Amino acid sequence: MNGILGALLFIILAPFLGGLIAGADRILTARMQGRVGPPLLQPFYDVGKLFEKENVVVTTAQNFYILAYLAFIIVSGALFFAGGDLLLIIFAFTLAHVFLVLGAYAVHSPYSHIGAERELIQIMAYEPMIILSAVGLYLVSGSFYVGDIIASTVPAILYLPGVFLGFLTILTIKLRKSPFDISTSHHAHQEIVKGITTEFSGATLGQVEIAHWYENVFLLGFVYLFFAFNPILGVVAVIVTYVAEIFIDNTTARLRWQAALQSGWGVAAILGLFNLAVVVYIIGGV
Amino acid sequence: METLLFLILFPALVAGAILVAKQKQLRFALVTVAAIIIGAASVWLLASYGLAGTVYFPFPSEPTSQIMVAIEIGLAAYIAYLGFRFRNYLAITLIAVQTVLIAAFELLYAENVHTANNFFIDQFSIIMALIIGIIGSLIAVYALRYMEEYHTAHPEVRNRQRTFFFIIFVFLAAMFGLVFSNNLQWIFFFWEITTISSFLLIGYAETDEATRNAFLALVMNLLGGIAFAAALIYLAATDPAGRILELDQLLASGEAIALLPAVLIGFAGITKAALMPFSTWLLGAMVAPTPVSALLHSSTMVKAGVYILVRFAPVYAGTLAGMSIGLVGAVTFLVASAIAVSQSNAKSVLAYSTVANLGLIAACAGVGTPMLEWAAILLIIFHAISKSLLFLSVGTVEHRIHSRDIEDMEGLIVRMPKVAVMMFIGIAGMFLAPFGMLISKWAAIEGFVQAPYGLVFVAILAYGGAVTVFFWAKWMGKLVAVTRYRTRVEDSFRKERWAPLYTLTGLVVATVLLFPVISSYLIEPYVTAIYGTTARLSQANIAIMMLMLALLLILPVSFLLFRRSAKRLPPYMSGRTTTADMQFVGSMGIAKEMTTRNYYLTEYFGEKRLLLPGSVICAGLILVSWLLAGVAA
C-alpha cells in the first residue's frame, strides 16, 4: 500500500518539485555568474507557454516517441518511489531514453541526429556506473528493492564512498550539466544548436522538459539512498550534491564525447569496481 | 518414445524425399507440409511429456551404435575427399585424428560398453525440441521462396536447392537426436552431423570465399569434435562397463570423475557456440544464404554448443575450471558486443550479437548456480526467437533494397513499413525492457551478484550491456527515420514469405507474456530436479513488466491523436535554403543532399583493435580450464 502511495505522490508532486529545483537552479546559477536571475517560478511559466504554442512538427511520429519517453520516465520514477527493484527501474529508465533518441532519429534532421548519437554515447557512458551503484547498494543492504534499501540501517555511504563519487560523475551527465551536456543543454548551445531536442517544439518540447523534471527528482532520490540510514543527513546530502553540480556546471567548459565516455567508464572501473571489490573481498560483505 | 523417434527419423526421411523430388512444386509442398508436421510434433511432445519430468527410454544400443560409427567413417572419408579436392590439409589431418580416436574407441572399448538408457527427455530437452521444431521449420519454409529469389539474383551459383533442403532437414534431425540422446556416443554422432551439415551449407555458393569459410568452420568444429572424442575414450577407460557414458550417470558421478570430460566436452561446446577465439567461423558463415545464417544462429548449431554447456553446468558449478569457462563466455560477451558497435553490415552486427549472447549463456553455465542456470535457459529461448526474426527480416530487406548495410536501411519505416516494424520488434526483443533478452540479462546480474567471485562477471555485464544498448538503438534509429520522398518498395511478397515473419514477431511478444508459465512449468522444475532449489523473478516484478508491455502496446494508439492538426515544417538547416528533398547549395556552389550517418567509433571498438586481444585472452582461459581440470582429476 505504501508503495502505491509513494508512486502516486511521485507522479503528482515530482513535476512541482522538479520545476522548483529548476527554478532554484537558475537563480543560483545566475548568482554565481553575478546576475540576479529569473523568479523561482520561471520554469513553470516557460513550460506553460510551450503548451500554448502552435503544434508544429517535422513528422507526427516524433510526438509519439516523446510521449513514450515521458511515460517511461514516469514509470521508472514511480517504481523507484514505490520501493521497487532498482535493476528493473534502471532498465525502464534506459527504455525511456531510447524513446527520446528514437524521436530525434525519426525527424531525420542533421542537428537532432548528432544529438541523438551523443545521447546514445551518454547512455553508454553512464550505464555501467549506474548498474554498479545498484549492485553496491545491494551488497550493503542485501536487497535490490528500494524499499529495503531505505529501511536498512547500514550507513551505505561509509562502505561505498567510491561508488558514490562515481555516481556523482554520471549524475553530471544525467542532469545535462557541463562539462557533459553534449547532447543538449540548458545553456546556449552553439555547435549543434539544441542537439537532440532541436526539432521538438511547443507541447512536445514541454513534455521533454517535464520528463526532465521527473528524471531529476528520481536521480536525487537515488542520491538519497546512499544516506538513507539518516533521513536528515540524506536530505542535506541531496541538497549539497545538487549545489555542487550547479557549481561544476558553472566552472567547467563542455568536453567532447570521448571525454564523457572515458569519464563514465573510468569512474565505473576505478571508483566503482574497486570500491565494490574492497567491500566484497576485504571487508567481506556487510 | 515414438514421438522422439518420429522427430529424429521423420526429418531425415523428408530429407531423403526432397533429394529425389525433382519438381519445384513438389519440393514446396514437401517442405511446407513437413515443417507443419514437425512443428506440430514438437508441440505434441510438450503436451505428452511436459509434466512428466525426466523420462529415460531403454533403447537397444545395438545395432544403432554400429550404424552410427559406419556413417561417421563414411562422412570422414567424404570430408577427406573434399579436403584433397580443395587442398585443405589441416581439415584432412583433423578428420584423420578424429577417425583414429573413434576407431580406437571401437576397437578397445566398444565391446564391453553397455549403455541402457540411450534416449531420454526432460524439460530442457523439450524446450530445445520446441525451438528446433518450430523456429527451425519456420526458417525452412521461409527459405523456399528465398532460395528461388537467391538463384534469380545469383545466376552464377549452381542451383543445388535439393541438396540445400536435404541438408537443412538432416540438420534438424541431428539436432533432435542431439537433445534426446542420453548416450554420449550418440550425442557425439549427432554433434558431428551438425558440424558437417553446417560445413556444407556455408559452402553452398561454391565461391572461393564460401569454400574458405566453410573449411574454417569445419576445422574449428573438428577441433571441438576431437576433444569430444577424447572425452569418450577417457570415460570408457574410467568405467569399462560404460554406464558412465550415459549423460545422467556422468552428471551424477561427481566432480572428481566428471570434471575433466565435462571440460573437454565443454571445449567442443565452445567451438560450436563460436565463442572467442573461435568466433571467426560464425562471422565467416555470413557468406551463406540468409536462411542458413538464421538457422545456424537461432535454432541449430550454436545452440547445440550452449546446450551441452548448460547440461554440464552442474559439474562446472563451484569449480575453478568452470569459472574459467564462464570467463571465456564473459570476455566473449564483452568483446563481441563492443565489436558490434563498429559494424555497419547488418548481418555482421547480428553475428557479433549472437557470439556475445552465446558468451553470456556460457558465462552463466560456467558459474552454474541455480539462478544462472535458469537465466541461461531463458536466454537460449529468447535469443532463438528474436535472432531468427532479425535474420529473416534482414534477408527480406536485402532482396528489396539490395544491401545489407544498416546505413542503407535508413527510412525503412517509410519504404518497407511492415518489415521495419517487425525488425524493430526483433531488435527490441534483443535489448529492451520488458522483452525477453533483458529479462534474462537481469536474472544473470542477480545470479552473478550472489555467486562466489561473481563481481567480475557483474562488471563485465554492466559494460557489455551498455555497449549493447548503443549498437541496437542506433540501428533502430536508422529504421524509424522518416525520410522524405522515398517510395514504398514493399510489394506483396508471397504468403510463404510473410507467414514465418508474422509468426516469429508474434512469438517475440507472446514469450514475454508466457514466460512466467514457461518458467514455472518447464525451467523451474528442471532446475529444481538438478539443484534441489530453483530461482525465478518475483511475482511483483513480473506483474510490473506485464504492465510495461501493456503500456508499450497501448502507446502506439497515440499516433491517432497526433495524426491531424499538426503543421509540418522541414528540419532546421541553419537557415540555408533547402529543397523539400533536403538538397542545398554548399559553400562551393555545389548542390548537396543532407545525409546522416551513424557513429561506428572504429578507433575504440574496431574489429582490428579488439578481436585479437579478446581471442588471446579467451584462448588463455581455455588452456587454464584444461589445466585446472587436469589438476583436479
Image (cartoon, coloured by chain):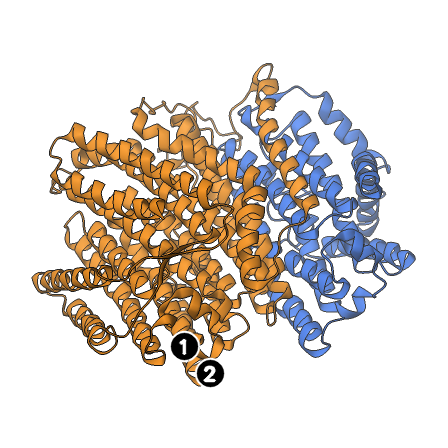
A255 lies left or right of B495: right
Residue B583 visible to the viewer: no
Residue B303, by quadrant, is bottom left
Q: Is residue B240 above or below residue A68?
A: below
Q: Which residue is mark 1?
A: B260
Q: Amino acid at mark 2?
A: Ala
Location of residue B417 in the rendering, given as x and y in whole percent from the top left corner? 42, 27
B559 lies left or right of B381: right
Q: B157 or B612, which lies in front?
A: B157
For chain A, what colour was chosen? blue
The residue tagged with tag 1: helix, strand or loop? Answer: helix
Please tell me which residue is depicted at 15% across the width and 54% down the height of the picture: B208
Location of residue B88 in the rendering, given as x and y in whole percent from the top left corner? 14, 66
The residue tagged with tag 2: helix, strand or loop? Answer: helix
Q: Who's orange, chain-wise?
A: B
Q: Which residue is mark 2?
A: B632
Q: Quick one: label 2, few (<14), some, or many (20+) residues within 10 Å?
A: some
